[in-house]
Image: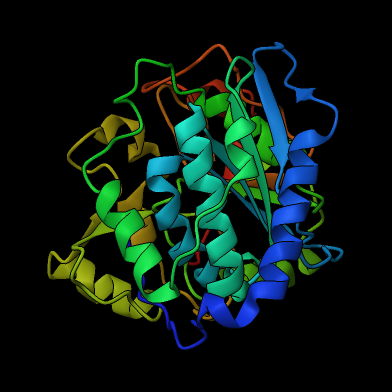
Amino acid sequence: MFMLHSTSDIRSLTSDSHNLIEMRTSVNDAFRAPVLTDSSGEYRIVKWPFIPAPVLFGDTTLISQCSVSRLHEFVDLSFAWDGPISLAVFVQSSSSLFTVVNYLLNLQLCLPHALRKVSVQLVMPLSSSVDCCTEFVDASCSKFFSKFDEHWADVRNYDSTIDYPNNLLRNIAIDAAMSDYIFVVDVDMIPSSGLFHQFREFTVKWPSDRKVAYVVPVFEMQVKSEMPLDRNELLQMWDHGIIQPFYRKLCWKCQRYTDYDMWHNLKLKHAAEINIAYVVEYHDPWEPYYIVDQKAPKYDIKFKNYGFNRISQVCKYLYFVLTASV
């Protein structure tokens, strides 16, 4: 799903030359710091040097990962989520690193709110050179993002000859999260408006249980359609064929245990609030999207590229509790 966002705070890079110099210095310092690697010793991890807003008690951090070619999709995600975000970006080569560093610098200057609550980790093969980051590109805000989108339009995560370590990226993003809960999503997904605050209110009423995951129903929609404002509008779009449950056609066995028909037919007294709708025990194969305690088991990093990567964590739970929110 996609959501349009306002770009009214876009401004010219030329008016922020002093800030740009400071940002470049911070980035260079980050790459000169002692090398931090993952547990396997295959990848270098560089924390983007700008500190996000503090995390509060009861917060949920949105966790996501992407390649450089999909980094532009993260902007929509950041504007849709009201809470903290932790993003891991896979940078497969020096040329990709040059691109992602310049993109993030421009994003920091042109759309500062997009990174206000975001922690970004750059993950790259240890063999990759970081010398590229001593040089930067100057570009106007009005042109840079469109050129970036055009350049990566037809590139997919798995087009490279280098394996895409999706589970490793998820774990790195989770390790960087400081909140009580995490919500792992794909970078091209858009959470419902208000979900962050609604779930905070929900957790006040229901004590945390580290072996329970709160499943959030996920839907696919036509790209040109407007996002539904609430559950009732979503149901109407579903009934008219504009929206359908996630993976309905591609891999229904991977999602059917969420029981979307039951969710559709729920009679809610307080539709604007999140409540437990029903309990679902785990079945194989099932890959729901869910909010869970931050100390939940991590993903199996042996899984790379496409297929059965998320399920390596899902099957470690005893049961799931489905929320009644969109």
Count how many numbered circles sit on residues in the image. 0
Q: Position of residue 214 (x, y in %)?
A: 60, 50
Can you tell which quarter of the image residue 238 is in?
bottom left
Tell me: 259 left or right of 183: left
Q: Residue at 30% across / 79% down in the picture? A: 233
The N terminus appears in which quarter of the rendering? bottom left
Expressed as whole percent of the image width and height from the top left, the position of residue 90 reads 52, 33
> Farthest residue toward the bottom?
8
Which residue corresponds to the image point at 71% horizontal and 64% vertical from the top-left?
21
Q: Is residue 41 left or right of residue 148?
A: right
Q: With respect to residue 209, does 169 lie above or below?
A: above
Tell me: residue 118, above or below residue 237. above
- Determine if residue 233 is in view: yes
Q: Position of residue 235 (x, y in %)?
A: 28, 71
Is 296 situated above or below 304? below
The answer to whether 249 appears left or right of 289 in the picture is left
Residue 116: tell me if it is visible.
no
The image shows residue 97 at horizontal and vertical percentages of: 53, 37
Residue 132 against residue 74 in the figure, above or below: above
Q: Quadrant of the C terminus?
A: bottom left
> Which residue is painted at 63% across and 31% down in the image?
131
> Which colour scheme appears in the figure?
rainbow
Name the residue: 24% across, 48% down.
Answer: 153
Q: Nearer the viewer, residue 225 or 247?
A: 225
Q: Quadrant of residue 54?
A: bottom right
- In-front residue for pair 36/140: 140
